[in-house]
Image: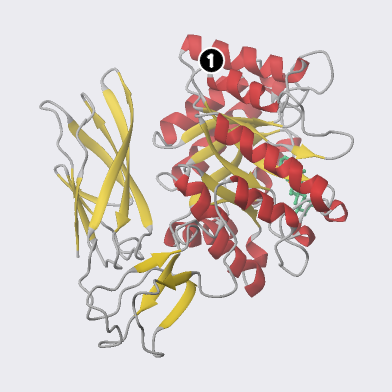
Amino acid sequence: MRRTLILLTAGAVTAAAAVVALSPTANAATTLGAAAAAKNRYFGTAVAAYKLSDTVYSGILNREFTSVTPENEMKWDATEPTQGSFSYSSADTIVNRAVANGQKVRGHALAWHSQQPPWAQNMSGTALRTAMVNHVTQVATHYRGKIDSWDVVNEAFADGSTGARRDSNLQRTGNDWIEVAFRTARAADPGAKLCYNDYNTDGQNAKSNAVYAMVQDFKARGVPIDCVGFQSHFNAQSPLPADYQANLQRFADLGVDVQITELDIEGSGSAQAASYAAVVRACLAVTRCNGITVWGIRDSDSWRASGTPLLFDGSGNPKAAYTSVLNELGGTTPSPSGSASISPSVSVSPSVSVSPSVSPSVSPSDPQTGAGCTATASVNAWNGGFVVTVKVTAGAARISGWTVGVTLPSGSAVTNTWNATASGSTFTNVSYNGGVAAGGSTEFGFQGTGSAPSATPTCTAR
Ligand code: G2I
């Protein structure tokens, strides 16, 4: 959250009580991520590891986005190029950077007919099924505790009017390959949300109806599925459907979260901006819509760059679509000059400086109001067990370490912890997530047996 910072030099204010009137928009968020966070949602982007050294790219990434999806680095061909030999360095670069910046990670994708390594493409039957299970186990275990949501299975349904599964080597191992992938992912990383992800399912049609029936069946039979991803690649041939929001809502009504996972909209100017705004409106209108991910940062980063489908132009300047998304999220672009005004009844010496849109900060002599930290928990419980994700948020000052206390019901026990060290039900930061910027946050989690804790956790900062 960026706020206007007003520095008053001692003695500069001559009136007894200085009244500082902030303009109405002074507290509105000025980035996509902050504006989405104020609506309890994330705003993410696909990231390519090899672009991170481009400072324009990484500057926008750090400033605007609160979630990242590796664009290609977690796919089967990238993570297991030779059977049984795993290669995580590019994906690790993206994930570790995101964790250090307090950004969520969407894992993409564990099981998919496309971008398989050649050895898997040539496999079938039991050998392929076993290889898939091992792949899901290894990759989800490697990233355990760092992934907000996994695309467990990607694009498993056919286009067109049949509502059939897509033919693929994985499909030919048996119709249960999807549920096996989900059960395997749950066992490997019980803290991650598990999503089914697809395209051309954004409106109600034969393909989305087939996915809907599968999710309904999974929920009825206890197959672990937590979310459905709607890729939302739109252009003139495949425009934003009129029933987009209704379609998101009908999936949410099945008891899963919904996420917009790969948004891009070809076009330019006000037409493009209007479509983007409509997507944001739809997500905000569906309570279980967790967030929006755009499929790249600048138009030039897009898999279909010629369609200029993203929010920033090739030079990294925000487009009309950017402003429209930000406004729709309730944010505002930073004003070019100071956005705070001093009431006329106060006389202020010329040494007052008003600096717009800098990160929240306090001068050294100020009391550290709001210093410390707060913790909130989200709980995923089942009969006999639970997974808790705890968000630690720093107050008005940067903190360099934190300890969170949780009250466990008697008979409950913590069995596994990630991104923190546990001593009983007290959790302390690990080396890479103790430092949290003012107003920033980080997450850790734990798994346990028995019934889940219900009270709000306590947080102590160092
Ligand atoms: O096709 C758009 C997306 C549809 N949904 C699933 C996503 O995973 C998919 O992403 C795209 C990436 O944006 C492309 O970057 O998936 C493509 C492959 O299916 C990616 O393209 C590949 C090229 O085909 C490869 O030649 C190239 O080596 O990117 C690779 C890495 O740059």
Res 358 seen here: no
Q: Nearer the viewer, residue 69 or 37?
A: 37
Image quadrant of residue 365? bottom left
Side of 286 where 9 appears, left or right: left
**Coloring scheme of the render?**
secondary structure
Position in image of residue 360 (x %, y %): 38, 68
Which residue is at the far left? 410
Position in image of residue 265 (x %, y %): 78, 44
Count the marks: how many? Answer: 1
378 to 86, vertically: above or below: above
Q: Residue at x 49, y 62 (%)?
A: 97
Q: Residue at x 74, y 59 (%)?
A: 319
Name the residue beneath numbered marker 1: 218
Q: Secondary structure at mark 1?
A: helix
Position in image of residue 249 (x %, y %): 59, 22
Q: Is mark 1 within 8 Å of ligand 1?
A: no
Q: Nearer the viewer, residue 38 or 117?
A: 38
Position in image of residue 302 (x %, y %): 77, 54
Q: Quadrant of the N terminus?
A: bottom left
Res 226 seen here: yes
Image quadrant of residue 380? top left
Q: Quadrant of the C terminus?
A: bottom left
Q: Nearer the viewer, residue 203 or 334?
A: 334
Q: Residue at x 16, y 28 (%)?
A: 412
Amino acid at the residue labelled 1: Phe
Tell me if mark 1 has few (under 14), some (14-19) or many (20+) residues whose alpha carbon lies within 10 angstroms of its own. Answer: some
